[in-house]
Image: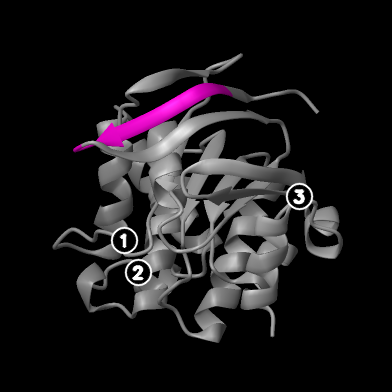
Amino acid sequence: MNTWLTIEALGLTERATCIIDDVSLQLDAQRTVVLGPNGAGKSTLLRLIHGLLHPTGGSLNWPQPLTQAMVFQRPVMLRTTALANVIYGLKLKGYAATECERRARQALARVGLEALAKRPARLLSGGEQQRVALARAWALEPQLLILDEPTASLDPASSREVERIIKAIAGAGARILMTTHNLGQARRLADEIVFIDRGRIVEQAPVAEFFNKPRTSAAQDFLKEEIP
C-alpha cells in the first residue's frame, strides 16, 4: 500500500508535561486503530494529526494532502434538525444550497436516519446523534475519517450500527484512523494496530499479529489486563 502519512519525531509538551514523546510513524493501511491504556496519548495523537493541536516538535508529512473529517466520542449537535446539522458542514465547504440538501439527505439515508431528518438533533438518542455526526462527516466525502472513541458511550446495538457505517465509509474508499477501548471492535475494524503507551509508539503491527503474538511486553501486559 502507499504511505499516506509519515510522522517524524512528533512531540507535544504542555506546562512542562510531555504528552506525545518523539513519535515516528508511517501509515499506509486503510484502517488503523490506535490502542493504549487510559492517558497514553491516543486522543491527543489524533488531534495532532487532524490539526486541532499544534506539535511542539517534529513534523507531519503528507505525500498527498487528504481531505479529512473527524468524529468525537460525544458529538456536538447544533440546536436545529438532524438535516440542518449535516447541511451546516456542507455550507462551510461552500456548496450551493440545493447541493447541500441533496448531499445531506443522501448521507442521512446512508446511516439509516432519513425518517428523522426533521427531528431536533439534540432530542435524538446518543446512538442516533453519533449517526448524525457520521452522516455529517460522510457527506463531505473525506479521504480520511478520524474517529475518537466513536462508540464509547453507546449501547451494543448502537455500537454495531456505528461499526456498520464505519465499514461502509471505508468501503467507499476513505482511510480510517480511530481509537477505541473495545478490543473486539479493534479486531473487527482494523487492518493494523498502533499501540501507544505514555506518549510513545511501542508497537505497530497487522491486526492478527498484534493480537496473536504481540512483540513487546507493554502490549502483552495491556492485552492480559484487557482480555480476562
| Residue assigned mark 3 | 191
Q: CA distance from mark 2 to mark 1?
A: 7 Å
Residue found at x 49% / y 45% = 146
Q: Which mark is residue 75?
A: 1
Q: Quick one: SS at disc 2?
A: helix
Q: Quick one: SS at disc 1?
A: loop
Magenta region includes residue 8: yes
Q: Quadrant of the C terminus?
A: bottom right
Residue found at x 33% / y 51% = 86
Considering only vertical position in the picture, is 224 above or below 148?
Answer: below
Q: Quadrant of the N terminus?
A: top right
Residue found at x 40% / y 58% = 39
Tell me residue 79's x, y (percent). 13, 63
Tell me residue 117's x, y (percent). 34, 66
Name the amino acid type tagged 2.
Answer: Gln
Residue range in magenta is 7-15
Name the amino acid type tagged 1.
Answer: Pro
Q: Looking at the image, is mark 3 or mark 2 earlier in the sequence?
A: 2
| Residue assigned mark 2 | 129
Crowding at dot 1, Cα within 10 Å, few <14 / some 14-19 / many 20+, comes out as: some
Q: Is residue 88 left or right of residue 35?
A: left
Q: Quick one: SS at disc 3?
A: loop
Tell me residue 122's x, y (percent). 21, 72
Crowding at dot 3, Cα within 10 Å, few <14 / some 14-19 / many 20+, comes out as: some
Considering only vertical position in the picture, is 151 above or below 61?
Answer: below
Name the amino acid type tagged 3.
Answer: Asp
**Marks 1 and 3: which is nearer the front?**
3
